[in-house]
Image: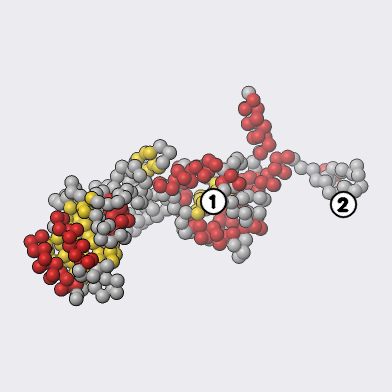
C-alpha cells in the first residue's frame, strides 16, 4: 500500500491516457533529454583517439548512453572529447571548433596530454587544453581505456543532471532584455 | 663499386676541397667544403649511382665556428652501398639546394630550415614545414631551451613555456654518471 505522501498525483481526467502522463519539473526533463543524447565531437589528435574509437565500437558500445553519434560537424555536437596531444599549431584550431559548438556544451580532456601536456614537456605542446577552453571532466591515463572514457562521460551525465537548465536560461533571458 | 672506392674517386676529383674521410663500422663518410658540396652530391648521384637521398639533417656545434654542419645520407636503390656527405656551414652562409639532384630533398631541406634556421639557395619553396609560418624561432638550435619561448601570432598560433620541473623525462646534463644523467622522473621541485 502506497502512502499518500509519495503517491503521484492523478491525471485521471481521461481513462485513455491515464498512466501515460508523468509529472516532472521542466529542469529535470530537459536535463534527462540532454544527458541521454550527448553527441560527441571527436577531437582525436593522437593515440587516445584510438581508444575513443574503441569505446564507440561494439565491444564497449557508447550507444548504450545515446552517445554513438560522433558528429564531425561541431554545429551538431554537444560534448567535445579532446583526445590526444594538443600542439600549439593545433591549439587555435581546437579553440575555433569549440567556439563553433552551440550551447549547451561540455568538454572532456581525455588522457594525460590533453589534461596537462603529459610527457611532452616541450616547446611544441600546449600544456593542457584547459589553458584554452573550459574542461568539465579530466580522464587520466596514457591512453585511458575505453571504460575510463565511459566513466568520464557518465560523470558529464551526472554533472548535467545537477544543472539548473531552465533557471539559467531564464536568468540569461532576463539579463538580455534588461 | 663500393662506397670506399667512391670516396677515393670523389677525393681524386675534388682534391683539396675534400676536408676529410672516415670509415667507422662499415659506414663511409666524406667531409667537403661548402663550395663544392653541390658538385659532390650531383657527382654521387649521376656518376656513382646514389639515386636515393635517405635523409638530410644538420648539426649545431654551438660555440664553434663554423657553427652548423650539413649531413646527407645517400644510398643506391638496390641498397648495395651507403655514403654520408658532411659539410660545415657558418651562420651567414646559404647551402645550395639539392632539389635539382633529388626531388625528394625538398621536404628534408624545409625541415632543416624550420628546425635549425639554415637557408638554402635555389630551393623552390623554402618555408616552414613543422612549425607555423611566422614562428620566430628555430627550435633545434642549441641555444633554444627545451621548454620553449613564448610567441604570439593573433588568430594563427601562440606558444608558451612548458614547465620542466618534475617532468617525467627530465635529464640532468653535466653529471659524469650516465645513470644519473639519463632521462627519468625527478622529485617535484
Front one among B89 and B183: B89
Mark number for residue B51? none
**Residue picked out by circle 1:** A81
Asked if residue B127 lies left or right of residue A38, the reply is: left
B122 versus B16 height, above or below: above
Residue at image position (27%, 52%) is: B123
Query: Where residue B124 appears, x then y in whole percent?
Result: 30, 51
Look at the numbered disc 2 and give the secondary structure of its residue: loop
Front one among B114 and A77: B114
Residue at image position (43%, 48%) is: A90
Residue A48 shows in the view: yes
Front one among B45 and B111: B45
**Residue picked out by circle 2:** A1
Q: Tell me whether the residue at label 1 lies in contact with that at label 2, contact meaning CB atoms closer than 8 angstroms.
A: no
Q: Give the chain of mark 1.
A: A
Crowding near the residue tagged with mark 2, few <14, some 14–19, many ≥20 C-alpha atoms within 10 Å: few
Query: Where residue B143 appears, x then y in whole percent?
Result: 24, 47
Based on the displayed image, in which of its 4 quarters is residue B77 positioned? bottom left
| Viewer-side label of 1, 2 | 1
Amino acid at each position: 500500500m502506497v502512502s499518500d505522501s509519495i503517491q503521484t498525483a492523478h491525471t485521471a481526467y481521461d481513462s485513455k491516457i491515464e498512466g501515460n502522463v508523468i509529472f516532472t519539473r521542466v529542469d529535470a526533463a530537459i536535463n534527462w533529454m540532454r544527458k541521454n543524447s550527448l553527441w560527441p565531437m571527436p577531437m582525436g589528435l593522437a593515440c587516445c583517439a584510438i581508444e575513443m574509437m574503441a569505446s564507440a565500437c561494439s565491444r564497449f558500445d557508447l550507444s548504450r548512453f545515446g552517445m554513438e553519434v560522433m558528429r564531425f560537424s561541431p554545429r551538431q555536437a554537444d560534448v567535445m572529447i579532446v583526445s590526444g596531444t594538443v600542439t600549439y599549431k593545433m591549439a587555435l584550431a581546437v579553440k575555433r571548433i569549440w567556439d563553433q559548438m552551440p550551447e549547451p556544451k561540455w568538454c572532456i580532456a581525455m588522457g594525460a596530454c590533453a589534461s596537462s601536456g603529459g610527457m611532452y614537456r616541450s616547446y611544441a605542446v600546449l600544456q593542457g587544453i584547459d589553458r584554452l577552453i573550459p574542461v568539465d571532466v579530466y580522464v587520466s591515463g596514457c591512453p585511458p581505456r575505453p571504460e575510463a572514457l565511459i566513466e568520464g562521460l557518465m560523470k558529464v551525465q551526472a554533472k548535467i543532471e545537477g544543472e539548473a537548465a531552465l533557471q539559467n536560461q531564464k536568468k540569461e533571458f532576463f539579463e538580455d532584455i534588461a | 663499386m663500393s662506397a670506399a672506392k667512391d670516396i677515393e674517386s670523389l677525393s681524386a676529383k675534388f682534391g683539396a676541397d675534400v676536408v676529410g674521410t672516415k670509415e667507422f663500422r662499415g659506414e663511409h663518410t666524406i667531409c667537403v667544403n661548402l663550395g663544392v658540396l653541390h658538385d659532390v652530391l650531383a657527382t654521387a648521384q649521376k656518376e656513382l649511382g646514389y639515386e636515393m637521398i635517405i635523409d638530410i639533417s644538420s648539426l649545431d656545434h654551438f660555440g664553434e665556428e663554423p657553427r652548423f654542419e650539413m649531413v646527407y645520407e645517400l644510398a643506391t636503390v638496390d641498397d648495395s652501398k651507403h655514403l654520408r656527405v658532411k659539410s660545415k656551414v657558418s651562420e651567414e652562409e646559404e647551402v645550395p639546394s639539392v632539389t635539382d639532384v633529388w626531388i625528394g630533398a625538398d621536404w628534408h631541406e624545409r625541415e632543416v630550415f624550420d628546425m635549425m634556421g639554415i637557408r638554402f639557395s635555389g630551393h623552390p619553396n623554402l618555408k616552414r614545414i613543422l612549425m607555423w609560418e611566422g614562428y620566430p624561432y628555430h627550435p633545434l638550435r642549441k641555444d633554444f631551451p627545451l621548454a620553449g619561448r613564448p610567441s604570439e601570432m593573433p588568430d594563427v598560433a601562440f606558444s608558451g613555456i612548458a614547465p620542466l620541473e618534475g617532468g617525467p623525462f627530465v635529464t640532468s646534463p653535466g653529471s659524469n654518471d650516465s645513470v644519473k644523467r639519463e632521462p627519468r622522473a625527478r622529485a617535484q621541485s
